Amino acid sequence: MKIEESFLGTGWSFPPEFSSENKSVKTVSGIEDINQSLHILLNTKLGERVMLPNYGSSLSDFVFEGLNMSMRTYITDRVRMAILYHERRIELNKIDFDQTRIAQGEVHMIVHYTVRLTNSRGNMVYPFYINEGTELK
């Protein structure tokens, strides 16, 4: 593990995975840990965690909304506040929306951030769409 990664933290991978050869839980560190933490934060509905009722962003509430400027601003504000309070390792730079696949019902939200301790930049692409019932396995 690099020194940079130990400063950024180490946590369980998400979803949790177990190694049969090491008989231990798989962990992630550094930027990967931050990206997985952001993914969990953005997928959690407000009130879903009993002990942390303000944790999450409830983005699933907006899946059927039209993505006009007002809605983009509202979603950006909701994500900004969630990151401000629950992911202190990063500073949010900006949020972009990639609507090139909107005809297929898919929008990607790109979260651009700077890691506070290392001043390195990163981004995470959050797929904002609904899995259709035809793709179930």
Image (tube, rainbow, N blue to C red):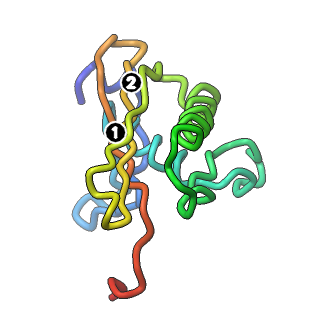
Q: Is residue 16 above or below residue 95?
A: below
Residue drawn at x 39%, y 43% is 109
Residue type, mark 1 in image: Met
Residue drawn at x 32%, y 31% is 30
Q: Is residue 109 above or below residue 131?
A: above
> Who is closer to the viewer here, 38 or 110?
110
Q: Which quarter of the figure is the C terminus placed in?
A: bottom left
Residue 91 location, x and y as percent? Answer: 47, 19
Indicate which disc, 1 or 2, sits on the residue closer to the N terminus: 2
Labels 1 & 2 near each other (Cβ < 8 A): yes
> Who is closer to the viewer here, 96 or 31?
96
- The span from disc 1 to disc 2 (Cα, nearest Å) is 8 Å
User: What residue sits right under mark 2 in the picture?
Assistant: 113
Residue type, mark 2 in image: Tyr
Residue 110 location, x and y as percent? Answer: 36, 38
Which mark is drawn over residue 124? 1
Residue drawn at x 57%, y 58% is 65
Mark 2 Cα shell of 10 Å, populated few (<14), some (14-19), many (≥20): some
